[in-house]
Amino acid sequence: MTFPLTPAMLENLLQRRNAYPPGAATVDEYIRSNFTQRYAVLVLDMSGFSRLTIEHGIVHFLAMIQRLVDIVAPIIVARHGTLFKQEADNVFAVFPTVDLAVTAAFKMLNALTIANQTLPEHQSLYASVGIGYGDVIALTEPSGQPQLFDVFGSEMNLASKLGEDLAEPGEVLLTEAAHAHLAASAYPSYSRTVTISKVDLLVYAVASGAEVKPLPIVETPVV
């Protein structure tokens, strides 16, 4: 059974662990038994932060981030996901299954492509996505409310690396664990080996095959 874990509670547990090393294994098991949940973790990274900030200023880029969040947040919710954190130009969300996370990823990328049809180039939105799957320590709001506040775990870290550092704009990369839980016929994929922190890991790029639908052209009648 999983109980709510606030940041203050986790801090207290870790301080106790540090203060009494012989009891570390007991604290570790207590945290694992009571505060872990299994999720598909999605990390979306917006492209072009440094260049656009230098060329147009930070307020311009912050406005772009807000536009992106406004576009992707409803898509996450519609696929039974939870957007638990938006940090700088990154969006973090969890889903019950990998299939829901991958579907949401392509819906979001497609929505950004459609939005770009009516945006000037210096406001165009591009993003890359990393997805992991596994047990994570789930933190709830500091107030004690049940809303998810943050998650910690290996698959969370790997998803961040894939989304922020390795995936190209418009690309969705999955960890090996996430790919193992993806429905076999849902999306075509291919594997490649990458090195993260001096460790060779197998990751998978997936493709949707979905086509972007252009916006209808509205003709202004001649008076």
Image: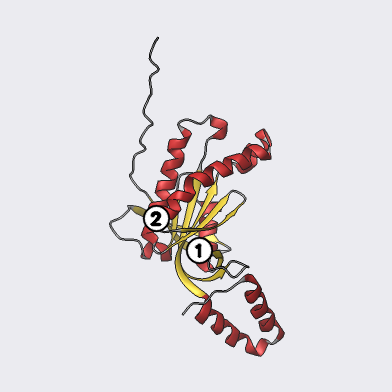
In this view of the protein, can residue 129 be seen by the observer? yes
Which amino acid type corresponds to the residue marked 2 in the rendered image? Arg
Q: Nearer the viewer, mark 2 or mark 1?
A: 2
In this rendered view, identify the residue nearer to me: 147 or 119.
147
Q: Residues within 10 Å of mark 1 (few under 14, many from 20)?
A: few
Residue at x-position 59% and y-position 48%: 89
The residue furthest left is 185
Q: What x and y, as percent, mark residue 58?
A: 67, 40
Tell which circle, 2 or 1, labels the residue nearer the N-terminal end. Answer: 2
Residue 98 is situated, as x and y percent measured from the top left of the image, at 39, 61
- In the displayed structure, would residue 105 be above or below residue 3? above
Residue labelled with disc 1 = 200
Kindly state the secondary structure of the residue where label 2 is placed: loop
Front in this rendered view, residue 140 or 105:
140
- Picture residue at 69% right of the left edge, 79% below the top: 15
Q: Disc number at residue 9?
A: none
Quadrant in which the C terminus is drawn: top left
Q: What is the x, y in percent for residue 5?
A: 57, 74
Q: Are marks 2 and 1 in contact (CB under 8 Å)?
A: no
Residue lying at the far right of the rendered structure:
19
Residue 205 visible in this rendered orientation of the protein = no
Say whether residue 160 is left or right of residue 213. Answer: right
Residue at 48%, 44% in the rendered image: 71
Residue denoted by label 2: 79
Q: Is residue 207 above or below residue 13?
A: above
Amino acid type assigned to the residue bearing label 1 in the image: Asp
Using the image, determine if residue 49 lies above or below residue 148: above
